[in-house]
Amino acid sequence: MKRLLIVSLFVSLKLSAQDATISVDVSKPTAPVSPDLHGIFFEEISHGGEGGLYAELIQNRGFEESRIPPGCSLDSGWLSPPATPHYGTGKVIDWKMKWEPVNQWPAWSLQTEGKSKASISLDIQHPLNNATPQSLKVVIESLGKDQRVSVVNEGFWGIRVDEGAEYNLTFYTRTDNYRAPVEAYLIGSDKKVLATSILKTIAGKDWMKHTCVLKATDADEKAKFFLTFTGVGTVWIDFVSLFPKKTFKSRPNGMRPELANYLAELKPAFIRWPGGCFVEGISTESAPNWKKSLGPIEERPGTYSPWGYWSSDGIGYHEFLQFCEDIHSDAMYVFNCGVSCEMRSGVFLSDEKVPGILADILDGIEYAIGPVNSKWGALRAKNGHPAPFPLKYVEVGNEQIGERYGKRFNIFYKAIKEKYPQLEILAAMGIAHLDKRTVQSITKMDIADEHAYKGIYWPMINYDWYDKYERKDFKLYVGEYACNSGVGNGNMMAALNDATFILGMEKNSDMITMSSYAPLLENVNDTDWPVNLIRFNNSKSFARISYYAIKMLNENKATTNLNTAVELKKQDDKSVGYPGKIGLSTWDTQAEFKDIEITQANKVVYKSDFNNHKSDWDLKGGKWSVNDGALAQTIDGAWPMAVLKDLNLDTYVLKLKARKTGGPNAFMFPLAIKDDSNYLRVHIGAWWNRVCAFEMISDGADAMVTQPVNLKEPIETNRWYAVEIHVNKSSIECFLDGTLLMTYNEPPRFFSIAGKDEKTGELVIKIVNAKAQVTTTKIQLNNALSLLPEGRAITLSANESTDENSFDNPTQFTPKEEVLADISNDFEYTCKPWSITILRIKAK
């Protein structure tokens, strides 16, 4: 029940069933809808590729995952890039990240039986090749009778083994005085042998490649791989690879079929790759290099992801381009422009290095689309693909901004466009919307890539956000978007917000020609981002409701938008306001509160007396005390709360005095508190005492639900401020020293756009009903031709806004199609609660 509380507070108790009217002028087309509006963005985050989309079953197959990334150093368990000036600020940032490996051979272990004696160690003598300089040295000193020594790999949180399936095993060895067979096993969590193969001899001073097939006679979701030695001696092993024979499109070095199918079934117009933060790296040396990701997989050194683990580069540049072709998508290649992640270290290469970077990216483009008689086009042909790949877009860096980046972008744009005029070149715009400084410093760009991670209700409050954008001589790509705060791991409310955001993009598709949700894939054993589109472990997977929302909206794009107006009946005045308790709070700030007075219907219902009645308040977190009649919070920390006990209110006026006594921020006032994890908050002096905003706390995650209001002056230390908060039926007003500071208005919950599909001759009406009640909707089709009496209604809905798909019920909430009957130019349709609906209506 706890997870439903925030819903009843802000939706079901606020809104009664509202009738709506959707008026569509069929004779007035507006913006065309971009056929390329929906694509996908894949980044190596949350083990989305390594241990996910990439089908390799062995973790740390080259014994390199304890290797320090290039350009970095390790000190006391912390990984640091060079301490050089930051690209954006020019200041040295002492940034570092936790080093994850707990030993020298992550995911591997030694197992001995009985009195057998053996040891393992990393060895750099006589390497297999330069890309994998480390091998595992196994010294078997003695064996008991009928006993074994094994090196064991746990896979990626277990290895899924399917009964009857075949697995291709490859590994390399060299030996010293070892002449016995080696046995390869897949063994289940219950110690049962699932598959086995025996290699009779591996003896040899030089590296030897071994291959065999393991065929499973049983199944297990948490199996392990054993390489077992039956004699004494020394064996060096390297590059142990285990692949299911069945991969997506049966490609060697291929992809996990059901995860690849999720992506293919989205029918993306394009794929953006490889990042994201991944393409930036934590140092310029550790950033991905497309050339090193080509060729035999045992010769690829791998890339360290800024998300804290090694990627083997099994999905390399060639595999990315091949996958785009396999699922009929255009390719967008993002390259590092000589700058590492600006949200981390910001280490960069000087301008003198730009010609080398440029030459490298031109080589990369030539590999993708150059003729077979060119140097890199010939290598593509040698690698089995003489025809050009579908590379259409090139993006210069990721989330870089500012004049310095703009000037560097201009160099890349000019050179790439001169040689490959058919390519569209994208400029990064940082982590939010269009950056004015960047736009002004760029001479010419084809597409700007802005990112839009938003909290719950932002897309609904700001539904007209893109309507107000000035149209320029470039197009807009919303390269990363998601409602990813206040929505659990991604529930129905997230899907409703995402769908609303998509409607806003689609109706502005004259400007926004491309978009992609992010992040795409999440291995639940290593979650680096709170909300992702597709969740999986080593054996199961499911797509979130937002996945199906994006899929149905993409499959039902119109060709041209039509002039559409939505009219809602006035909200029911009998609806309840914002019920719950009232609190006081801070964030890394010390503050005092006094003279608290709460009135309801002009009657005082509470007046503070901290000297005698401190026990009226439930004090949680922080360090609270009474100081000269005021309640003081005296230490730093996140969200300590003082909650007024035994007083639940809906509409009221809260008056008090507050002063900041230390720290970077100011005051927070939790309202409508249902529990410690679900409430609405008035935040004065947020973002280092610069802005004020209303924030939603849902399941412990905070999300800003109004545009921040800039403070004219920062909140002063040791000055008392008069704060007044008016909680009304459908709005909340906050006053500071008698002046209205900001207002929260209950957002609309019903949205619609309409268009015409020129291919089928159908009208396409898209509706989001983000309410707990049905909405009886009058649909007026003005200036329409004669319509067929039957159409189709495609609906994605849930029982509660907190509903989610899951491993146990992976397709519980998916679109359902039914016949739409009794259609006319003026008809009625009832939208389900918590629903996304598409109506398709055909003219005669």
Image (spheres, helix red, strand yellow):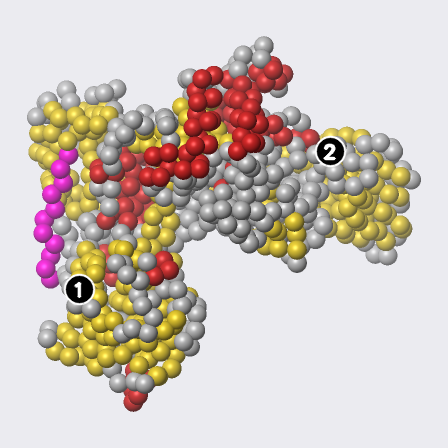
Q: In the rendered structure, which disc, 1 or 2, sits on the residue that comes first in sequence?
A: 2
Describe the element under mark 1 as helix, strand or loop.
strand
Query: What is the x, y in percent for residue 278?
Result: 52, 40
For image coordinates 33% across by 51% down, the residue present is 455
Please name the residue that numbered disc 1 is placed on. Answer: 739
Q: Residues within 10 Å of mark 1 (few under 14, many from 20)?
A: few
Quarter of the image with the N terminus is bottom left
Please name the residue that numbered disc 2 is placed on. Answer: 130
The quadrant holding residue 777 is top left
Q: Is residue 259 above or below residue 32?
A: below
Query: What is the x, y in percent for residue 730?
Result: 16, 59
For image coordinates 30% across by 32% down, the residue present is 512
Residue 241: say if magenta.
Answer: no
Report the mark closest to the observer, 1 or 2.
Answer: 1
| Front in this rendered view, residue 330 or 742 | 742
Q: Is residue 4 above or below residue 520?
A: below
Horizontal arrangement in the rendering, residue 91 relative to residue 192 (left or right): left
Q: Which residues are magenta?
A: 564-574
Residue 568: say if magenta.
Answer: yes
Q: Amino acid at mark 2?
A: Asn
